Image (cartoon, grey):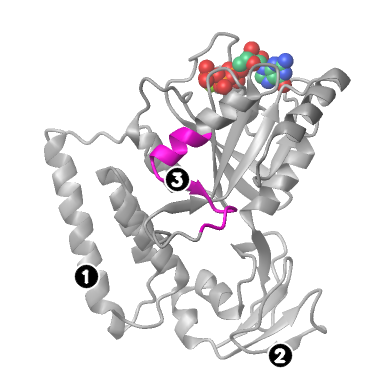
Amino acid sequence: MPTNLPPEYFAADKKFREAESASAKISALEEMMSTIPKHKGTDKLRADLRRKISKLKSVKQKKKGGVKHESEYHIEKEGAGRVVIIGLPNVGKSSLVAQLTHAEPKISESPFTTWQPMPGMMPIDDIQIQLVDTPPLNKVHIEPELFDLLRTSDLILILVDLQATPFQQLEDSLDMLREHKIYPKQKKGNSENEQKINSIPFLVVVNKDDDDKCDEDFKVFTELLETDLPLIPISIEKERKIEKLKSKIFEVLEIMRIYSKPPGKEADLTKPFVVKIGSNVEEFASKVHHDFYQKLKTARVWGSSVFDGQLVGRDHILHDKDVVELHL
Ligand SMILES: Nc1nc2c(ncn2[C@@H]2O[C@H](COP(=O)(O)OP(=O)(O)OP(=O)(O)O)[C@@H](O)[C@H]2O)c(=O)[nH]1
Ligand SMILES: [Mg+2]
């Protein structure tokens, strides 16, 4: 195993090992490929991955009788993060995607309206987050590929209906995730199996909090609820707390925006790179270009925790909205 593989490689490798379908395996391998710095020391690893990808693709092709047909659950990742919305029937999943993105999923007062996932892009300030509407959770049958989709998400948004049975709905949703070994990242387990399970940030959103009377019901709901999970009430119909929900999503994703400044030029402040909170200069450099991870020597940073243009090393921790000039 070559050294100097970035953390994103190991995260994608974990997804590969846990994927349930060929499509999910292929996309995890492709993600691994994209994170590997290109140099002599990684030639063998890249060749191995290419072999695995083509083998899986040919198996998939044979299964489908040679006809290429992508599953609806195989959705290209776009933007700075993927949020998959799940919940029982009629809680407002499609309404939420319709409200926050340009997508137009079907919405109806009768349950089981949505049959397949549908992505849309939600702007938050200067970045875009992918939101995915999904068919309702249902104890009788759920497409196993839904869980593959959830494993590729950066945040799982569990939607419940305050005007129905929010406790039961939350419990049922968490149970179904648990059955497929998907656990909230916020819960610090002491399990020695931690490597084997999927931990993804969860956000519980309580919809249909339409008025003051509903606010009272929400208060009672939270008082009785014992959970460490982040929780927020909204009303899609009455457009209550929608902006707060967007900020909460940004917060739970634990990401920050970093602007790249080419030496001798102005920074492009319209197109941030998005990295995990706590990332350092070398992690940012690998986002800008694979080769930069190897070649990087120092950097200059402008932002909240440095003096303007401060010269820093590879391990300097960055902050949201920093401007960075990489020196190779
Ligand atoms: N009172 C109220 N009704 C809402 C709110 N948001 C959505 N609804 C209604 O709830 C019903 C279900 O909405 P959908 O968005 O289709 O729900 P869904 O979760 O996608 O439903 P399935 O696809 O069947 O699982 C529709 O009649 C919506 O108009 C809200 O904030 N308050
Ligand atoms: Mg729906």
Vertical relation: 118 (above or below) 194:
above
Mark 3 neighbour class, 10 Å CA radius: few under 14, some 14 to 19, many 20 or more: some
Q: Is residue 42 magenta?
A: no
**In the displayed structure, would residue 113 be above or below residue 169?**
above
Q: Secondary structure at mark 2?
A: strand
> How far from the left and from the top, in percent, is residue 69?
25, 33
The local secondary structure at tag 3 comes to strand
Label 2 vs 1, first from the N-terminus? 1
Residue farthest to the right, as pictured: 212
* Residue 311, label in figure: 2
Image coordinates for residue 195, horizontal then vertical, percent: 40, 61
The stretch of residues the image draws in magenta is 174-189
Distance from the alpha carbon under mark 3 to that under mark 1 = 31 Å
Sequence-wise first label, 3 or 1: 1
Are the two marked residues, 2 and 1, in contact with CB atoms closer than 8 angstroms? Answer: no
Instruction: Examine the image and state in which quarter residue 70 appears.
Output: top left
